[in-house]
Amino acid sequence: MPWRDRSGAFSPLKALTFALLFVPAVLLAWDAWQDNLFPKPWSEATHRAGLWAIRFLLISLAVTPARQILRQAKIAELRRMIGVAAFAYVALHLFLYIGDERFNWWKVGSEIVLRFYLTIGFVALLGLGALAATSTDGMLKRMGGRAWRRLHWFVHPITVLALWHFTLQSKADVTEPMLMAGLYAWLVGYRLIAPEGSAPGVLALLGLAVGAALAGAGIEFAWYALGTGINPWLVLQANLDVSFGPRPAVWVGIVGLGVAALRLVPMPKRRRAVRRAPA
């Protein structure tokens, strides 16, 4: 059962996470029932499902930093559940897109082949499907730890493809794709600086916050320089103006600084069982 830990005991944390993963789908179904998905219900539903797929994908990658910084080993047990949820939402995303095309399979297939942003999105979906199918303990044993880890490393190029797809289909407003790209840069940077099995120090996390913010600004600059006709230097300068709210790169820096501050908070140490000598 997904709400039980490895020992088979009931896990409130896993049960709560399992329930929360259904919330976006329930809200989407409710809005569809209430006719709140206007002006294009199928298109809006497709967008929402894809958005939550990428959010859950990033959250699954954030499990390791959360486990290490909070010093709570049980958080690691949530990664598989959240990763499978990411695949479920991207599968729903594809199904809703097919519905938007009136279930015209020939048209859907040709669009995926001919439209680049759909092609890379479909490749990302296939990759997530492979990772979800091999996420079980049984597959881990069959493949062996090294091969399994090598395969699941592909979550990173899959995430890049998903973010690229999201950015291309967002067209004019790329605020959230740029925010997610910056947060992903932080997640990658964390893995590069984290010691084996533990969290980086505060100074390292502060440097990471600055670096991820700069990376986010750089990604946004590159997007506007290469993908639009908008002056990228004006967009870069906008990061210094918060009169209309912080830019995505600024939010990435704020999140990074928050994580660094969290590192200063004393966390309860895991208790070890004390063996008593036989009487």
Image (cartoon, helix red, strand yellow):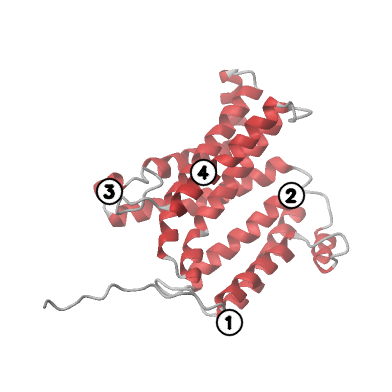
Task: Tell me the mark number nearer the camera, choosing from 1 and 2.
Answer: 1
- Towards the viewer: 264 or 85: 264
Question: Mark 1 against mark 3, which lies toward the viewer?
Answer: 1
Q: CA distance from mark 1 to mark 3?
A: 39 Å
Q: Which residue is mark 2?
A: 174
Tell me which amino acid carries mark 3: Met
- Which label's residue is closer to the chain start, 4 or 1? 4
Q: Nearer the viewer, mark 4 or mark 2?
A: 4
Q: Are marks 3 and 4 in contact (CB under 8 Å)?
A: no
Residue type at mark 2: give it.
Val
Residue at disc 3, secondary structure: helix
Verify CB contact (< 8 Å) between mark 1 and mark 3: no
Please name the residue that numbered disc 1 is placed on.
203
In this view, 279 is above or below 82 = below
Image quadrant where residue 71 sits: bottom left
The percent coordinates of residue 274 (x first, y second) are: 26, 76
Left or right: residue 47 compared with residue 128:
right
Task: Answer few, some or many: residues within 10 Å of disc 1's Cα (few below 14, many 20 plus, some between 14 and 19).
Answer: few
Dividing the picture into quadrants, the one containing residue 25 is top right
SS for dot 1? helix
Tell me which amino acid carries mark 4. Answer: Ala
Q: Quadrant of the C terminus?
A: bottom left
Q: Label 2 vs label 3: CA separation?
A: 39 Å
